[in-house]
Amino acid sequence: MDLFVQLSVIVVVTLLLAALMHFLRQPLIIGYILAGIIAGPYLLDIAGSEILSVFSHVGVALLLFIVGLGLSPSVIRDVGKVSVITGVGQVVFTSVIGFVICLALGFSSIEAIFIAVALTFSSTIIIMKLLSDKREAESLYGRIAIGFLIVQDIIAIVILMAVSTKASGNSVPLILTAAKGLGLIALAVAAGAVLPYLTKFIAKSQEFLLLFSLGWCLALSAMFFYAGFSIEIGALLAGITLSISPLRVEIGAKMRPLRDFFIVIFFILLGSQMQFTHIQTFMPEIIILSLFILIGNPLIVMLLMGIMGYTKRNGFLAGLTVAQISEFSLILIALGVNVGYLKAELLSLVTAVGLITIAGSTYLILYANKIYPVISRFLSVFERKGKKVEEKNGKGKLHDVILFGCDRMGHEFMEAFRRIGKKPLVIDYNPDVVKGLAKKGIDCIYGDANDSEFLGSLKIANAKMVASTIPHFETNLLLLTEVKRMNPKCIVIAMAHRIDDAMELYKKGASYVILPHFLSGHHVALMIKRFGMEPRNFKTEKEKHIAHLLHKKKLGHEHPLHEK
């Protein structure tokens, strides 16, 4: 079939299934994978298409490039330790426990080793897509999860290289590949010092900026691929080297439409490669191993993060990101089959586990904020007592005002409270924000508005006002419900991005709901009514606004400190 017609049919099939998933309020990723299953062996047999394979690799590269744009050196420094410990620890514990389970299920030692190791790897691509869709890639747990998923990928690449080398009986390629990889990393880091200045010149042309960003991403991906590494590492490093550029936000915005199209092709191709022969034979093993991944892996991560002093909520959310296996798992088993270590039917077993865990973990991650309040009281065993991060003046003091979230709008609230002589208690779940506030002598606590137990520990009954700059409707609804239960007369200010959400918050008792887009438009409309068509008035207002922005920039409020 002509490639254009084939691609057109694939897109239409995917569109129909995505529309069905949207109508059923299901994750669109499930629709993409189902489209691949249908378009694979049953419709077009696209599993071996080289063009679609290239498209899928481009999607992976763009996704990781955009993630890398958000991983500045300071972020890597902050979460690097916990990411390495959690990533390595999870791989070790899952391998050992998985090996014991596989032996108990009757697999041979070599089969148990391969399957157990394959079960340790989680899909970086799927998790990054889900975190991006939820706008939580920049959250504390999101940054930690991305960190240990990258650690997993590095371990997976080393293991795949080692298995390939063992099969060939030659140890030289492994050493040479590692040396080439280190050399490329050094070159990329050196280039990173020049790129911010180069992008300022390139940005004079928006088309040139897009082309440069795409070329830099694909160039580093290709270089790492030919050095024996995966394109993922090259694409991620390409993004990290541009993360210190002042144009990183603009670059990310321009690349996202390309990413969204090509990453859909990745999921379609992933679905087309699913093999379902011999599934009935291995059904008990598939169920047991799937439950181990969906339940056991998150518990391991929660235990490790709890030991390192993170809250049970961050441990729970980060743990869900390892509740599935990845494409590396399928590659490892396929390699084991190709070199004669494993029977071919084991690939079908791991494929079935992959589909079940990918679908299951997708639902768990998307609905995590609704699941957590139900089970939070059972998770206290995973949380170490004592401080989780530096705080200033804990929960013992009484405060008239409690502010949840200290991003750009939060700082405006802080200024307003200062003018009326009120010192608020600031609640934020980002440790960087809490540390910064503590240094300024502001009363602050590291906590999460989604945690009803945490809300109950605050002295909300004595507060006269509770304000939230958190953009998530479910979080604000829970916060509003808990505040009104503990203090019915309290003034509650919340935020929403949809009119329906705002009306629902008003029904639940909100004193005022901020809709940022409407508020900005209303402000400009008032300016037009006040100034008319007189340029001098707008020039005066412009100068005042510039002075205000420069003042905020001087205070370090140029970018939001976190996105909830």
Image (spheres, rainbow, N blue to C red):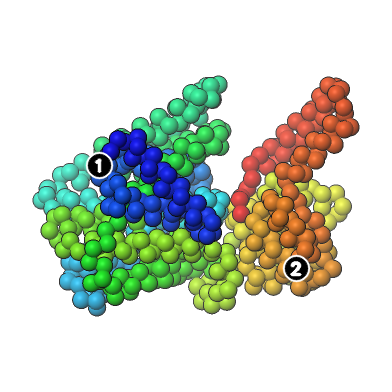
Q: Is residue 64 visible?
A: no
Give the answer, above or below, for where 365 lies relative to 216.
below
Q: Is residue 279 visible?
A: yes
Q: Residue at x 77, y 63 (%)?
A: 507
For label 2, the SS is helix
Give the answer, above or below, for where 111 lies relative to 432.
below
Give the answer, above or below, for where 456 lies relative to 28.
below
For label 1, the SS is loop
Q: Which residue is mark 2?
A: 483
**How packed is label 2: few (under 14 Cα within 10 Å), some, or many (20 or more)?**
many
**How packed is label 1: few (under 14 Cα within 10 Å), some, or many (20 or more)?**
some
Residue type at numbered disc 1: Gly
Q: Position of residue 28 (x, y in %)?
A: 48, 53
Q: Which residue is mark 1?
A: 228
Q: Residue at x 77, y 54 (%)?
A: 513
**Furthest residue toward right:** 530
Locate the C terminus and report the quarter of the image it occupies: bottom right
Q: Residue at x 20, y 54 (%)?
A: 335
Single out the mark in the foreground, 2 or 1.
2
Distance from the alpha carbon under mark 2 to that under mark 1: 56 Å
Q: Residue at x 27, y 62 (%)?
A: 276
Residue type at numbered disc 2: Val
Is residue 437 left or right of 136 when viewed as pictured? right
Question: Which disc, if any, is residue 40?
Answer: none
Residue toward you, 491 or 174: 491
Is residue 133 left or right of 13 when viewed as pictured? right
Q: Position of residue 329 (x, y in %)?
A: 29, 58
